[in-house]
Amino acid sequence: MQSIEQIGQELSELRRRLATVFVGQGEVVTQLLITLLADGHALLTGVPGLGKTHLVKSLATLLALSFRRIQFTPDLMPTDILGGEILEQDPESGRRHFRFQEGPLFTQVLLADEINRTPPKTQSALLEAMGERQVTTAGQTRALPKPFLVLATQNPIELEGTYPLPEAQLDRFLLNIVMDYLSPEEEAKMVALTTRPAKEQLTPLLSAERILEMQSFCREVVAPEGVIEHAVQLCAATRPGTPHCAPRFQQYVKWGAGSRASQALVLAGKARALLDGRPNVSREDIDALVLPVLRHRVIVNFQAQSEGITVEKLLGEL
């Protein structure tokens, strides 16, 4: 029988091993583990060169999960992700038949690298997979491996050659994790680590079965009624045109957070409590997750853009 203490020890060891190959970004690592425990997906946002890809690859190795990487480019097609039917000929009978060739999506950890470098048509190929853990192609529905985790990296949309993700696509991500520059001290440590002759080799720490057990246990963490109401009220305050919308959101927001955001707040709160070794969610857990859960689900209007009002500023006021 697993316990909070056992899970805490395993996650602490996971953090320690990850720190041997990835320097700094402690809050980013915490939010990645929250995504894992909550059985969600995460968007990693930051300028190039911050180690987003290296972090995801290292995490996949420690989790002992199958891993694939897709480099999103402007000419990438949906079939390049999902796979498709190919025509084969039986060498003995000479008969031809179609066989489904799985695409890189059929894995346990998918690194969607620079997802906003490809047009929305190809981005949307991930929608069913992320929402239902299955893919429908050629009239057949095929289940994806468990656990299934999409970690997508994107460059800031101000950079040339990027396509903003559609709202429906953004809503499938549990968290939007923003990576910032390292401090000079952390960067010096990172440079020393990555330029030395020998690198420490990561070995698997967990298994797919153990991760599924943790995800199941995460849902058993208690969320008091008052905490759930707090999460719902925060999300309702972002919705313009409704009675519960906060005045500033009424003025500056084009599209507020939907009901999936309330679910995400509570579920991510459960994962955060579990990481801290607590059996129940607190209001502090919810408040700490407002930015990563809501920053990609609230869309500001033109007035906000013209006045320099950002989503982060509005959520901070909330």
Image (cartoon, helix red, strand yellow):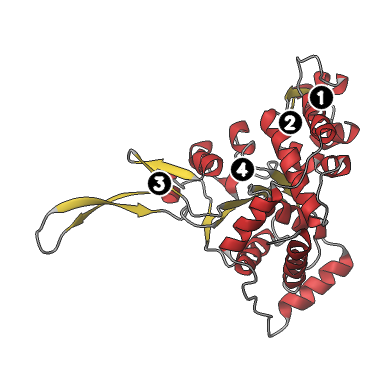
Q: Label 1: which residue?
A: 237
In the image, 311 versus 94, the foreground residue is 94
Q: Quadrant of residue 101?
A: bottom left
For the residues labelled 1 and 4, say whether their Cβ atoms are less than 8 Å apart.
no
Q: CA distance from mark 2 to mark 3?
A: 32 Å
Residue 184 percent across, percent down from the top left: 88, 66
Q: Label 4: which residue?
A: 162
In the image, 182 versus 61, the foreground residue is 61
Q: Label 4 sits on what residue type? A: Thr
Q: Is 174 left, or right, of 120 in this rendering?
A: right
Q: Which residue is drawn at the image coordinates 53% and 57% (left, top)?
A: 108
Q: From the viewer's perspective, is the residue at label 1 or at label 4 nearer?
A: 1
Q: CA distance from mark 1 to mark 4?
A: 30 Å
For the residues labelled 1 and 3, say whether their Cβ atoms are less than 8 Å apart.
no
Which quadrant of the figure contains the C terminus? top right
First of labels 2, 3 by sequence position: 3
